[in-house]
Structure formats: C-alpha cells, structure tokens
Image (spheres, helix red, strand yellow):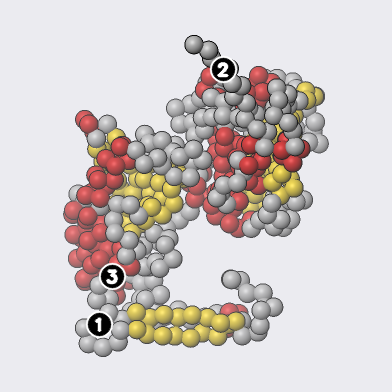
C-alpha cells in the first residue's frame, strides 16, 4: 500500500488572521496581563504597567522574563509551553495562543523584549503581521530572528533586572478608552489586586491604578458560597452571591466566573431565569477545575459544567426567592418586610442573623429610599440635559415602574460626562 507524505505547515497568514476574534481592547490587554501573572518571579508581588501612550499599547511586568530557549518556543504557534517551563498550579495559559491572538487583535505590529532573571542579556523579537501574510508557505515561512543585546536602560524595560514587555503598535483602534481598560482589569484580576499585586495604566494625562471592583448590596444579603458537587464532592465551588441595591435592565447582573483568579465569564445567568425580578442577583464564583475555551472567553460546555450547573441551580433557589420577594410590592422600601426577607435568606444558607436597622437603608434611586424621593440632578448636569419622567402601571394592585431619561439641551457638541 502506497502512502503519501503531507507537510502540515500552516499558512503564514495565520499570524494575522488569528486576531480576527470578538475580543474587545480591554479583553485583549487583559490576556497579556494574564501572561504576566503566569510569569511571576518567585513569591514577589507583581507590578504590571499598561502603557497606552504614543499610539501604542505596552504591557510591561517585573516577572521572571524568558530565556532564549523559552522565548523561541513561546513565539511558535500553539506550542505546549508546559513542556518547556515549570508552570504553577494556577497557570492561566497553556499553548501561548493568548499572546499572539491578543497582539494580532490589537494591532499589526508587535515586539517582545525580555530579560531572564539571573541573566545579563535582553532578547528582542518583532512581528510585522502584514509582512508575515505576504510570505510563501515553505519551510522558511515561519523563520523568526531573535536579537540578543545588552540590557537597554532607555528601552521599555528600563533598569529592571528581569521582566518582559510586549509592545503593540499600528493599532486597529486608534483611541482605546483608558477608563474601559481600567475598569475591566480591576474586575478581571480582582483576586490578584486584593493580595497586593498592582496594575498601573499610563496615558497622556498621567498614571491610574486598577482597583478591585466593588459592589453595592442590600445589607445582609451577601452569602458566602462554599459547596461541592460531583462524585465524592470532587468539584469545590467557592465565592459569594448577594442582592444588588438596584434592579438592572442592562444585563449587568448574574455571576462573574473566575478561573485561577482570571475572569473568564462575565454576568453569567445560566443558573437562574433571567428576569427583571432576578436582576438584583450578583455574585462571583471560582471554578478552577473547569477548562476555559481556547481564547479564555468562557468555559467549555462539558459534562462537568452540566453537573455544576444542575447543582448551582438548586443551590441558588434561596437567593432567587429573596430577589423576587424584594422586588415585589415595593418591599425594598419597607424596612420590616426587607428585614424579614433578608432574615429568611440568611437562614436558608445557615448564615448568622443580621442585626441591622433597615430604616436607615435606602439607595435614593427607588421610591421611598433614604432620601424619600428620587435623587436630584446636580446643577452641572442640569445645564447639559433635560429630564423627562414616565410612570407605567399606576393603579390599585399594579406594580409601578418609574422611568427617567435625559436629553442633551445644548446640541451634539456638548461635552457631557456621559454618552
């Protein structure tokens, strides 16, 4: 029987086309930041700088850097890096696709500068994706040159003894929003930031530090999650869940799911019916035992995921019941009824009872809040917008829904602090 030998070499165009994902700019930067966390040097705290000045995006860390051997493997397509470096048990990456995909989604040219710990050299490699796409598919198509130099104190790594810098230029989005990146990183790496790691963003205005995101919950509604499911309780789920002060019609409720301290699923609602009455439910869970999708923008819908989903759907019935109760008949405005609902919620999860005076609680955004009325517009905002109000469902026994909306009064040229 005859056999035909086929050379399985991917087209060089792959280097550019892998950037055609649905990653947002904050998500792509977050993937590069995740690589920095994987490269932590010993037990030191990480300082990661995201430089968004001069029409480029740079992610610079004080991690352990890469030797020439590790770098040469890291720049290959889909190389199993666990074969070349010792990864911690909480490593986020595996095949190195996040680096290449994120860089290609951000721009058409990127460079890597790296100084390995304990070494005295700096390695540099550059990728021009337009040039790569023009290469012929032959044995030399994927040849890449790595420069070995003395450390350059004027380069992206400055005077650092070790670390890595990834610099992306010829950006596809000319003016990425710094505030969106700052908000995403504070949420995506909340666990790391709480333990002392730092992420600094530099822009034309100055420096900004990513801070762990905070939630505004109804007092006493936050419940710690410690539960197991699967054969012999093999799958341990930790985190928390609570009731937001407000209902949400923008989809910003549900669970932020983390894997090894990195956000992989935002506002997931798989474990309860998405509805206005459940739109107070917010929480965070850690599912380290599940595999993420290839680009770490979700979790693989495996048998384990289905086991977890069935368990969590049952586990969350108490918080779902409480969310429905709080949202009915203006109960958010009734201290005694709110106290009863929160008491039942805590009892259902064996949480200590809360000693709290709900007469003092109020968001000011719902009828009967702490101020007794809706919040007033500041004078600065009044100069920019005109407020209109609409009330639906008035009448005996009907749930009342108040809607406020705003229109700019000075034309499209007005620079308001909102869209």
Q: Is residue 333 left or right of residue 42?
A: left
Q: CB of mark 3 within 8 Å of CB of mark 1?
A: no
Q: Quadrant of the C terminus?
A: bottom right
Name the front one of labels 3 and 1: 1
Label 2 CA crowd tier, 10 Å (few <14, some 14–19, many 20+): few
Displayed quadrant of residue 61: top right
Q: Position of residue 175 (x, y in %)?
A: 69, 57
331 vs 137: above or below = below
Q: Is residue 163 left or right of residue 283?
A: right
Q: Position of residue 200 (x, y in %)?
A: 63, 47
SS at mark 3 in the image? helix
Label 3 CA crowd tier, 10 Å (few <14, some 14–19, many 20+): some
Q: Which residue is mark 3?
A: 327
Q: Position of residue 317 (x, y in %)?
A: 22, 55
Residue placed at 77% from the left, 23% from the top? 148
Q: CA distance from mark 3 to mark 1?
A: 13 Å
Q: Is residue 34 left or right of residue 311?
A: right
User: Which circle's residue, 1 or 2, is located before the other in the chain?
Assistant: 2
User: Which circle's residue, 3 or 1, is located before the other in the chain?
Assistant: 3
Residue placed at 60% from the left, 58% from the top? 179
Name the front one of labels 1 and 2: 2
Q: Is residue 211 left or right of residue 258?
A: right
Displayed quadrant of residue 169: top right
SS at mark 2 in the image? loop
Q: What label sits on residue 230 in the rendered view?
A: none
Q: What label sits on residue 398 in the rendered view?
A: 1
Residue placed at 71% from the left, 49% from the top? 171
Q: Which residue is mark 2?
A: 4
Q: Nearer the viewer, residue 414 or 374?
A: 414
């Amino acid at each position: 029987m005859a056999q035909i030998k086929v050379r399985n070499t991917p087209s060089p165009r792959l280097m550019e086309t892998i950037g055609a994902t649905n990653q947002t700019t904050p998500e792509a930067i977050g993937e590069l930041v995740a690589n920095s966390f994987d490269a932590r040097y010993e037990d030191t705290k990480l300082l990661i700088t995201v430089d968004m000045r001069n029409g480029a995006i740079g992610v610079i860390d004080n991690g352990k850097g890469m030797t020439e051997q590790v770098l040469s493997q890291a720049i290959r397509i889909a190389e199993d890096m666990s074969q070349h470096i010792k990864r911690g048990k909480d490593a986020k990456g595996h095949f190195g696709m996040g680096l290449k995909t994120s860089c290609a989604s951000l721009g058409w040219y990127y460079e890597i500068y790296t100084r390995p710990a304990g070494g005295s050299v700096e390695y540099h490699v550059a990728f021009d994706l337009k040039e790569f796409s023009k290469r012929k598919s032959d044995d030399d198509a994927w040849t890449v040159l790595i420069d070995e130099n003395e450390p350059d104190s004027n380069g992206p790594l400055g005077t650092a003894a070790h670390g890595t810098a990834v610099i992306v230029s010829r950006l596809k989005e000319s003016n990425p929003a710094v505030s969106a990146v700052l908000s995403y990183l504070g949420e995506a790496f909340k666990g790391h930031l709480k333990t002392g790691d730092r992420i600094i963003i530099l822009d034309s205005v100055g420096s900004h530090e990513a801070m762990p995101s905070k939630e505004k919950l109804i007092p006493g509604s936050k419940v710690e999650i410690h539960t197991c499911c699967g054969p012999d309780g093999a799958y341990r789920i930790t985190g928390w869940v609570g009731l937001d002060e407000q209902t949400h019609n923008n989809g910003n409720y549900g669970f932020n799911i983390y894997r090894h301290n990195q956000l992989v699923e935002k506002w997931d609602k798989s474990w309860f019916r998405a509805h206005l009455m459940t739109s107070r439910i917010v929480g965070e869970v850690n599912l380290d035992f599940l595999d993420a999708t290839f680009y770490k923008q979700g979790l693989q819908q495996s048998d384990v995921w289905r086991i977890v989903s069935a368990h969590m759907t049952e586990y969350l019935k108490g918080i779902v019941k409480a969310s429905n109760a709080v949202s009915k008949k203006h109960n958010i405005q009734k201290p005694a009824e709110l106290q009863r609902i929160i008491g039942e919620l805590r009892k259902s999860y064996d949480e200590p009872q809360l000693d709290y005076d709900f007469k003092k609680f109020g968001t000011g955004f719902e009828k009967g809040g702490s101020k007794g009325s809706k919040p007033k517009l500041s004078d600065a905002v009044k100069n920019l917008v005109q407020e209109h109000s609409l009330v639906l469902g008035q009448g005996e026994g009907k749930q009342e829904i108040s809607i406020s909306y705003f229109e700019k009064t000075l034309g499209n040229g007005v620079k308001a602090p909102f869209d």
